[in-house]
Image (tube, rainbow, N blue to C red):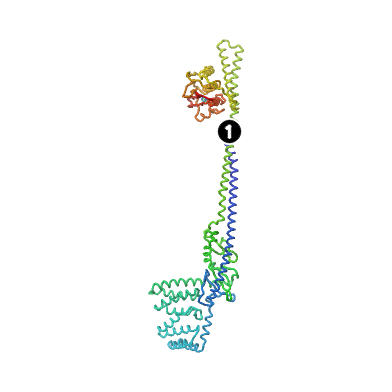
Amino acid sequence: LRHRKQVFLFLVAVLIPSLTLIFFTQKILRQERELAQKRAVDERKRMALEIGRELHLRLERLKLEEAPGIEAALAYTDEYSLPGPAVGFGILEDERLVLPWQASSSSGRALHSSLSAPVVAEAIHDGERAEFERKDPRLAADLYGKALISASGPGKPYVRLLLARALAKSGRPARAFEQYGVLLDLPPREKDEDGMPIYLYAADRLVNVPTYTDRIVARLGAALAEKPWMSLPETGLVASLLGRILEALEIPDGTRGQATGLLDMVRSYRAKAEHLVEVQQGFERGVPPDAGWQLDGRGEWLLGLGPLPGGGRFLLAVGVHDLSGSLRADETLRQVYPAEIVLAASDSAEGDPLGPDLGGLSILVAGGGDIPAAAGAAESRPFYVLTVAAVVIFAGLGGYLLWRDVRRELGLAEIRSQFAASVSHELKTPLTAIRMFAETVRLGRVKDEPARTEYLDTIINESERLSRLLNNVLDMSKIEQGKKLYQPRSQALAPILCAAVRTMHYPLRQQGFSLQVDIDEGLPEVRVDADALEQAVLNLVGNAIKYSGTAREIALALVRDGDWAVVRVTDFGVGIPLADRQRIFEKYYRVQSSENRQVPGTGLGLALVAHFAREHGGRIEVESAPGRGSTFSLFLPLRFEP
Ligand code: ADP
């Protein structure tokens, strides 16, 4: 029970501080990690603002770069192009957004003024009456032909269109195709009053004529290459023309491939045009600030206003997707955002805002890759863990050592108190016997001589036992104090053993033991302390008597074994369990068995014998079989040089 309490106390003393330490370290680590994460997030936010500033600069530069091109495009000069990632534009007229194809509607006005010359207007008027009221297309064709000769300027293609129509109606397709063919070569900027390029009307008429297919496809290709935006009706017409060409079975493969590519192109223009119309519709609701950019309704374009070199302002639309792409290609950025990044509207959950000038655009890390700054926090972790582990291990070790010491101390205290008890007990028995026999003799009650002698022998024997006991105690205390105990001298061992046998003669006889003595007289002399050797033999024979149980035989031998003289004491008593066989030579140690508890003893005898053997350069050995007896062999070297 006490043992269990000790273990419990030990655990409490070591475990509670250790657990507390671990708990707090854990907490510190967590806090540190959170802090590092916060720092990383702050750093990222700061970087995002920086990137935003850089992006803003680039976009502003783009405005300046695009402006001349846009102006040129609106003026319909030949050298315009839309560079960079810009995907659409419009111009501002009276704070209203006008899309590119709407801007050039001035051609419609020019058309009317060029047809208002009296000769031309009259011929067209007469021609239309002949065509629709009198149903005479041949006359109408003549009249339109006259008008065509007099017409000039932007109106001329329109008159040719009328002529071609009348020719077709009057059953002269070859001549009609000829006129349409002329119209097909017109540049896209030649439009009717609805803003539809005239060449498309011609293409519409000619599309069913197989010989014209190649020319139409080539014409559409050139127009699309020249003009990257179109009105919605225009894209519709071009798409339907291409569709009809592709439906025809007998067109050559090359033409088919070209037409398919053009169809894809025009579809993407159409999507762009639709998007621009959306932007136009939503424009009044949110005009972007002069120096800033704004996300459009779909979140796909950034819209910004810029000045045109020749006066006026324009709106530039830049694809957010293209911007992300150009950011990903950036070297310095990749060091801060190693993972894939995308740009998105800020209202999407996380992401770092790019700043107020970029219309609430945020930078997002796709796939949530780790940011380098956050990785730094993990570095100090092993250090903390190791420190705590070391502290816990040392605490545990220290606790264990302390616990062991305390236990040993307690064990010793117990042994000492037992020792005191057993010494007093051992003293009492002989003293009582001596006193009793001495009183009996003195009272003169013992009449016959043999009995008297017997009594006196007992008294002598008991006092010898007493002195042996006292010698043991005194020797042990001398050993403990480190005093010199032995005075070895070269001498024969046999006489010392005989003296011991004589001393034990009485107690052996009294308790009915028979001692078998076997002494090798031819042994050389050995350097020993005679008194100490006698005491050792007496201790061994005494033990044989004490632990014989019911056996009544003991053997004592002195033999030579190589360079050793061996004193051997054998009994046939209780024996010694294997577990105790080494420990019986420790001082105060006694085997705790039920038989032994009856036997008085101090636990000093064998410790002294072992000490004697060691000091004389020898050793003590024991062989034993529990219940069958033990043999103690005291080995002394024949050539001992202390
Ligand atoms: P003590 O005999 O006073 O107890 P010892 O040091 O002489 O002390 O012996 C130590 C222990 O060794 C004894 O308590 C006993 O248990 C065991 N012992 C010694 N000699 C024998 C023996 N001959 N047979 C059995 N046990 C023995």
Residue 220: x, y in percent? 45, 75
Q: In which quarter of the image is residue 446?
A: top right
Who is closer to the viewer here, 522 or 473?
522
Residue 290: x, y in percent? 60, 70
Picture residue at 60% right of the left edge, 45% below the top: 21
Q: In this view, does 345 lie above or below 568?
A: below
Residue 296: x, y in percent? 55, 68
Q: Which residue lies furthest to the left in this view?
A: 250
Q: Is residue 73 above or below residue 555?
A: below
The N terminus, quarter of image: top right
Asked if the residue at label 1 sits under 8 Å from ligand 1, the reply is: no
Q: In this view, does 309 lie above or below 390?
A: below
Whether residue 334 is visible here, answered yes or no, is: yes
Say which residue label 1 marks. 408
Q: Quadrant of residue 586?
A: top right
Q: Regarding mark 1 in the picture, which secondary structure is present there?
A: helix
Tag 1: Cα neighbours inside 10 Å, few (<14), some, or many (≥20)? few
Who is closer to the viewer here, 636 or 235?
636
Q: Residue furthest front?
A: 641
Count of picture labels? 1
